[in-house]
Amino acid sequence: MAERRIIHIDMDYFFAQVEMRDNPKLKGKPVIVGGKASTRGVVSTASYEARKYGVHSAMPMSQAHKLCPNGYYVRARFDAYREASAVIMSIFKSYTDIVEPMSLDEAYLDITHLVRPDLSASKIATFIRRDIFEQTGLTSSAGVSYNKFLAKLASGMNKPNGMKIIDYNNVNDILMNLDIGDFPGVGKASKKVMHNHDIYTGKDLYDKTEFELIHWFGKRGRGLYLKARGIDHSEVKATRVRKSVGTERTFSTDVNDDEEILQKIWELSGKTAERLSKLQKSGNTVTVKLKTYQYETFSKQRSLREAVSRDIDIYNVAYDLYNDLKDPDVPIRLIGVTVGNLEQSTYENMTIYDFIER
């Protein structure tokens, strides 16, 4: 079996870059996409100029405004981002059918079958980035390696508008000296646990036994053990299987009124049911998520004997979960409803009248 060649392409500050392309006056300015500074939403993307002020994605807009009061705040235009993404994904498909999109602005490509003595993986990545820029006016960064984990890691190392190759000659030095927070998949909470166990670098992670890592991190422990050694056998999947469908909303002000919150849960249940219907899916789990006014996130899930897809069925479960989860004395700023463990829907009790246009 030929050694794999994987490319991970990640668009640079995608939403903000689209805004700068469509409005050249924003070029070189601290652009923050996500809504008005006065709203309760969060930052979707920040340009590199805005990041210098400490602004980053998922930050509350109110906090971004304090850090960067003279920033250019732009409401998200998802139609424009989807349009640009469609062009980018078609470019990927022009090179290989083995493309695994991870979001609108990033994807893995398996190009093993394209590599020849006169056509290296890095040259192919350069061609792809050139095509993206020529057709969209947008820059991207690429990581090239022999597995998905290392390709993803590499794509973030020379941003923006750069490329990095990780191979057998440099993989050990890169992983051993890597800050533990820079490992893909290690967030703030995991990083804190790592530090509690004296893990600050890839070398520290490498020195821990598999048993220790499983004890501290559960099933993730084995994955961390392998990643510290640069091992990742996961394949690039040409079609990602959707595991869940959900919607969430941020309130304009903190809310502690059950009636108002339950009305929002009913609306979210309806929107989730609409999306399930379009996908012809139903789900065996329902999850309710809420975020308090102190930005603490809580969620509760219920597994069901029979799959649900109708708004009323989703709402009935979500209603119970909300009542179990909500502290009556704590206002919330966000509520979400998700249906997971999806399966193909079956149509039941349909008659001829269901097919008559009204």
Image (cartoon, grey):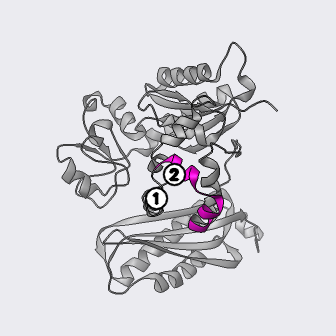
Any part of residue 358 in sight: no
| Residue type marked 1 | Asp
Q: Say which residue label 1 marks.
A: 198
| Residue type marked 2 | Asp
In the image, which residues are magenta? 201-216
Residue displayed at 66% across by 49% down: 240
Of the two numbered discs 2 and 1 on the same chain, state the one appearing first in sequence: 1
The location of residue 353, given as percent across then percent down, is 72, 69
How packed mark 2 is, by other alpha carbons closer than 10 Å (few <14, some 14-19, many 20 or more), is some
Q: In the depicted view, which residue is nearer to us: 174 or 306?
A: 174
The location of residue 25, given as percent across then percent down, is 25, 29
Classify residue 264 as left or right of residue 70: right
Q: In the depicted view, which residue is nearer to us: 73 or 58?
A: 58
Q: Say which residue label 2 marks.
A: 204
Classify residue 173 as left or right of residue 258: right
How packed mark 1 is, by other alpha carbons closer than 10 Å (few <14, some 14-19, many 20 or more), is few
Q: Is residue 211 magenta?
A: yes
Residue displayed at 17% across by 43% down: 70
Q: In the depicted view, which residue is nearer to us: 40 or 53?
A: 53
The location of residue 261, given as percent across then percent down, is 39, 77
Figure check: 154 above or below 315: above
Residue displayed at 76% across by 72% down: 348
